Image (spheres, rainbow, N blue to C red):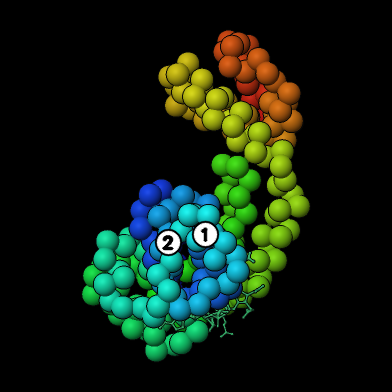
Amino acid sequence: MSAWYPLLLKLEGRKCVVFGGGPVAQRKAEGLLQAKADVRLVSPGATGQLMEWFERGLLRWTAREAVEEDLDGAVLVFAATDRGEVNRKLAEWAARRGIPANVADDGENGDFIVPAVLRQGGLVLTASASGAGPALAARIIGELAERYGQDYNENVEALRTIRRIVKAKIADQAERRELLRAAVSDEALTEWRSASWLHEEQDRLILRLRQLADERKG
Ligand SMILES: C[C@@]1(CC(=O)O)C2=NC(=C\c3[nH]c(c(CCC(=O)O)c3CC(=O)O)Cc3[nH]c(c(CC(=O)O)c3CCC(=O)O)/C=C3\N/C(=C\2)[C@@H](CCC(=O)O)[C@]3(C)CC(=O)O)/[C@H]1CCC(=O)O
Ligand SMILES: NC(=O)c1ccc[n+]([C@@H]2O[C@H](COP(=O)([O-])OP(=O)(O)OC[C@H]3O[C@@H](n4cnc5c(N)ncnc54)[C@H](O)[C@@H]3O)[C@@H](O)[C@H]2O)c1
């Protein structure tokens, strides 16, 4: 089993090519669209959903079988056809060009795998069983979706503001860390949701964070 390294990629506007037009390719394309990538689909056939995204101009679709030139300028390649030999060939072409490839029917033979994902605004939770159990990864994300609901959209935005203020106002690293940790307790998160004063009253915020930090030590 490979020792996979998790990371979040910035793909906005960058060319990502998905080969295949079935449900697996659709899932990969959907994740890429959420990341605002420049999505290119290459496949003779496509699901109704992929066709709809194409018709709405959300992705480009080349309706034929894969050729090597399809990889020109790509930063990521997804080999999601139902033909093992085609997926293998795509991975070879990608390797030759130094482009990381994902191989849908043989994860271990690709450069990266795609985890199950829950997006709640800026909160991005992912789960992976390193290819051993995609269904387990999906189940865990389903459980996390119940725990981390819509509220967390607002939390993440409030935290962005709080972090900016704390970074600007508190020079001492250790104190910063203490305040920013205090800012993410359940009690604090609940409080920020109704704290419309956050932006304007920076001193009040720092004071409140100190209180919360002291309570934690308490
Ligand atoms: C997480 C998710 C993300 C996504 O695809 O976006 C994802 N698979 C999902 C679902 C899923 N896939 C499969 C089932 C049926 C049950 C089962 O077989 O277990 C289900 C469950 C279902 O459909 O509910 C079958 C399957 N999957 C792979 C193979 C081939 C192989 O084993 O190599 C086969 C057998 C095909 C065959 O039968 O031949 C391979 C991969 N699938 C991965 C990701 C990567 C590893 C992820 C990890 O473990 O971290 C990896 C290695 C490559 C990749 O695709 O990146 C998405 C859930 C999204 C969600 O719903 O939230
Ligand atoms: N990674 C995963 O999450 C996962 C999950 C289930 C299955 N799989 C594997 O992924 C494969 C794809 O699954 P699916 O359900 O989307 O399959 P599918 O049969 O629904 O779709 C395959 C697509 O590949 C296209 N295609 C065929 N030859 C092509 C070529 N030469 N160039 C470009 N496109 C080509 C077809 O037009 C079709 O749209 C399956 O065969 C299975 O092995 C992977």
Residue 86 coordinates in the image, percent (x, y):
39, 85
* Left or right: residue 22 compared with residue 38: right
First-in-chain label (1 vs 2)? 1
Residue 144 visible in the displayed image: yes
Residue 130 coordinates in the image, percent (x, y):
53, 71
Q: Disc 1 and disc 2: Cα gap in Å? A: 9 Å
* Left or right: residue 61 compared with residue 187: left
Whether ligand 2 has any atom under 8 Å from the Cβ at mark 2 is answered as no
Could you tell me which secondary element the residue under label 2 belongs to?
Answer: strand
Report the amino acid beneath label 2: Arg
Specify the quadrant of the image occupied by residue 22.
bottom right
Q: Residue at x 58, y 72 (%)?
A: 47
Residue 208 coordinates in the image, percent (x, y):
66, 17
> Mark number for residue 55?
1
Count of marks placed on residues: 2
Report the amino acid beneath label 1: Glu
Whether ligand 2 has any atom under 8 Å from the Cβ at mark 1 is answered as no
Placement of the C terminus among the 4 image quadrants: top right
Q: Residue at x 31, y 62 (%)?
A: 74
Specify the quadrant of the image occupied by residue 96.
bottom left
In front here: 31 or 159? 31
Could you tell me which secondary element the residue under label 1 belongs to?
Answer: helix
Name the residue furthest front. Answer: 55
In the displayed structure, 27 sits above or below 86; it is above
> Mark number for residue 216?
none
Of badges 1 and 2, the one in the foreground is 1
Residue at which label 2 appears: 60
